[in-house]
Image (spheres, rainbow, N blue to C red):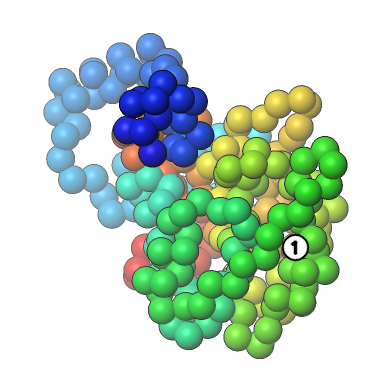
Amino acid sequence: MSALAVRHDAINLGQGFPDEDGPASMLDAAQQAIRSGLNQYPPGLGIPELRRAITADRLARYGEELDPDTQVLVTVGATEAIAGALLGLVEPGSEVILIEPYYDSYAAVVAMAGAVRVPVPLVPDGAGFALDTDALAAAITPRTAALVINSPHNPTGKVFTDTELARIAELAVEHDLLVVSDEVYERLLFDGRTQTPMASLPGMADRTVTISSAAKTFNCTGWKIGWACGTPELVAGVAGR
């Protein structure tokens, strides 16, 4: 897609990378870290300083208290975190609900996990798109194990409403579902929109794996730095422990 966009001088809506690099201070800090010798294997859960920074950020922005030693896993981009969540926490043969349209890696990871993809499409609502919560409820069966939600949404840009998120949470609790909440665009908000973390809703902290990405936040997609947050048990499952 990128090659075709360049060839035809077209606007590229096929990949989520920015038009400019990240903050100069961040690029300078990376150079200094490389020169200082921080170039070898990190701990399995990720560099401790980064994990502490992640927990401090979530506490400051969302009031969410996490243990950096057990509730944060740094990954090779958000895609690895999504893959780890579905491969580590979903049993083969179970069903995973995806909200259409969706990031193309979701379907591949569901297939790798030996699970069955169940799409529930967004519907036009005049001003954008809405989640048909009745269709979502109807898609849940005794085999449903997980739901992947992405808000702010790729590719539509939709920010799920509090009403939609509350209904998702109700269904997840009612049917004992895992929710993989892809929140990589959590800082890319416009028109006064705000981000409500799925894990902050009633009954959701113990059943939500939250996925975030430095690549999207800091305009450094080639760095492939993501992370997963959740309970110690969920994070251990994502890590394959």
Q: What residue type is labelled 1?
A: Ile
Res. 15 in view: yes
Residue sitting at 23 percent across and 19 percent down?
31
Q: Which of 110 and 51 is in front in this view?
A: 110
Quadrant where the N terminus is found in the figure: top left
Residue 240 in picture, x, y percent from top left: 35, 68
Q: Which residue is drawn at 60% across and 85% down?
A: 143
Residue closest to the eye, 175 or 112: 112
**Residue on which disc 1 sits:** 168
Task: Residue at 43% x, 48% y: name it.
Answer: 78
Residue drawn at (64%, 41%), measured in percent from left and top? Answer: 156
| Image position of 116 with respect to 122: above or below | below
Picture coordinates of residue 151, whole percent (x, y): 64, 46
x then y, percent, for residue 125: 83, 47
Residue at the extreme front of the image, as rendered: 8
Q: x, y (%) of residue 159?
A: 71, 42
- Whether residue 60 is visible here, answered yes or no, is no
Q: Which quadrant is home to the C terminus?
A: bottom left
Above or below, 233 relative to 227:
below
In this rendering, would 92 be left or right of 96?
A: left
Q: Give the crowd class for mark 1: few <14, some 14-19, many >=20 residues within 10 Å.
A: many
Q: What element carries label 1?
A: helix
79 relative position to 63: left or right: left
Tally the numbered discs.
1
